[in-house]
Amino acid sequence: MLYCKRCNRLVEGEICPKCKKSRHLRAPEVGDPVLLCTVRYALSAMIEPLLEEEKIPYSKAALGGSAFLGGSTILENYAFYVPYGAYAGALELLTGIFADDEEVRLALREAAD
Ligand SMILES: [Zn+2]
């Protein structure tokens, strides 16, 4: 398992699937921020207190503004980052709680592909 320090994601293999490069890859360190998932506001508001409750340190970044898609306005998406040392625990927590929520499961998978 390697870490892309440009995309803040864990990478299986030799090339980052996001930036398509290998030169940003290195072995992950405990404090490296890892992308946990990118979700819309309503879900971010559910995820945030869960991470806080479990004392999982995280940072949140707003991505882009609103956009039109299928007639409904999508407000900002939020990307959650957790330190590499806390990533496995955070992933397990959210996978368990959102076991029946296809949207969150997809977001978790997408961030880790
Ligand atoms: Zn990358």
Image (spheres, rainbow, N blue to C red):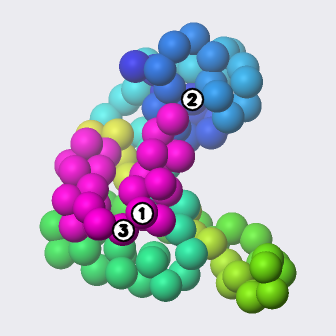
Label 1, label 3: how far apart the Cα atoms are: 4 Å
Residue 84 in magenta stretch? no
Residue identifier under label 2:
4
Q: On residue 5, which mark appears?
A: none
**For marks 3 and 2 on the same chain, the one whose residue lies earlier in the sequence:** 2
Residues shaded magenta: 86-113
Residue 93 in magenta stretch? yes
The residue mark sitting in front, 2 or 1, is 1
The amino acid beneath tag 1 is Glu
Residue at point 16%, 67% (across, down)? 54
Disc 1 vs disc 3: Cβ atoms closer than 8 Å?
yes
Seen in the image, is 107 located left or right of residue 88? right
Label 3, label 2: how far apart the Cα atoms are: 28 Å
Residue at point 37%, 29% (across, down)? 29
Label 2, label 1: how far apart the Cα atoms are: 26 Å
Q: Position of residue 52 (x, y in %)?
A: 25, 74
Q: Residues within 10 Å of mark 2 (few under 14, many from 20)?
A: many
